[in-house]
Image (cartoon, grey):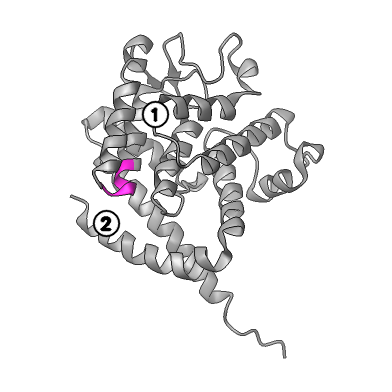
Amino acid sequence: MFEKEIEEYERIRKEYQQKVAEKMGRHEWMEYNEILFSAHSCAIEGNSFTVDDTRILREQGMGMVPVGRSLLECTEMADHFRAFDYMVNHLDSPFDETLLKEINRLATEHTLSYRAPGAVAGEYTKEDMAAGDTVFGDHDELTARVPNLMEATEKAIADGQHPLVVAAKWHGYYEYLHPFRDGNGRTGRLLSNFILLRANHPLLIIRMEDRSAYIAALKQIRAEGTDEHLVSFFFKAAVTRMKGELSQKHKNSLPVVFF
């Protein structure tokens, strides 16, 4: 299953690594990804920061709040930066509950008290959850499944399953469990990219423009009992992103005629 998607992905990934990622250098490429990924991942959850706003905040810190953005949004974005930096600097960590809880703690540390008074960042919810038009199951039963999910995913990685397939399957089941009081989406997208980065693959950036398709693919896991739609969405998003940046690279390399 997914042989054609994997073949296309790997062909484009090879070109992307050579012409985009390696040409930038590790530091520049990661900084570019951090800004782009943070802007879109937080936007999916309702943050109004643009990519330019995110770049300004990353470069100038909380002393420079972009015009028209709230302090809460700035704080959420700053927390996301911290979670992203931790992820990148701990790629040798086991894919386990300790990592999961730390990423969630960092991603929600300074905003959780506003959104869910009494909840503790990085700790599983003590209440049943709902998001949008979805009501999740009993929180005790769902959070009890998290250790098995992390262990099964680590085994799938060790068994050599394709990283993007593993990342998608983990993401879909994790969001089904929805174990934290807040930040499940941001945490899920961060840890999916942990899987990819540890395998030396490009980050998957789910753009705000694709939010509806992304949410629909997640919902189909519940409706149809299959994660095929989400895996296909991950491949499409990854290939579209790499093709787009390769196209930009080509266009911006063409000579410019001034006169």
The circle drawn on residue 203 is none
Q: Is residue 162 magenta?
A: yes
How packed mark 2 is, by other alpha carbons closer than 10 Å (few <14, some 14-19, many 20 or more), is: some
Quadrant in the rendering for residue 243: bottom left
Identify the residue at horizontal 46%, vertical 29% (top origin). Answer: 99
Range of the magenta residues? Answer: 161-166
The circle drawn on residue 5 is 2
Q: Is residue 88 magenta?
A: no
How packed mark 1 is, by other alpha carbons closer than 10 Å (few <14, some 14-19, many 20 or more), is: some
**Looking at the picture, how far across and down is residue 42, in whole percent?**
57, 37
**Looking at the picture, how far across and down is residue 67, in whole percent?**
78, 41
Farthest bottom residue?
A: 259
Disc 2 on helix, strand or loop? helix
Farthest front residue?
A: 92
**Looking at the picture, how far across and down is residue 249, in whole percent?**
53, 71
Whether residue 151 is situated above or below residue 40 in the rendered picture: above
Identify the residue at horizontal 72%, vertical 43% (top origin). Answer: 57
Whole-angstrom CA distance, mark 2 to mark 1, is 28 Å
| Residue closer to the observer: 77 or 193 | 193
**Looking at the picture, how far across and down is residue 8, in whole percent?**
29, 63
Whether residue 11 is situated above or below residue 53 in the rendered picture: below
In the drawing, does residue 194 fall left or right of residue 45?
Answer: left
The circle drawn on residue 96 is 1
Q: Earlier in the sequence, mark 2 or mark 1?
A: 2
Identify the residue at horizontal 58%, vertical 47% (top origin). Answer: 34
Mark 2 vs mark 1, foreground winner is: 1
User: Could you tell me the amino acid type at mark 2?
Assistant: Glu
The quarter of the picture where the C terminus appears is: bottom right
Disc 1 on helix, strand or loop? loop
Identify the residue at horizontal 34%, vertical 26% (top origin). Answer: 176
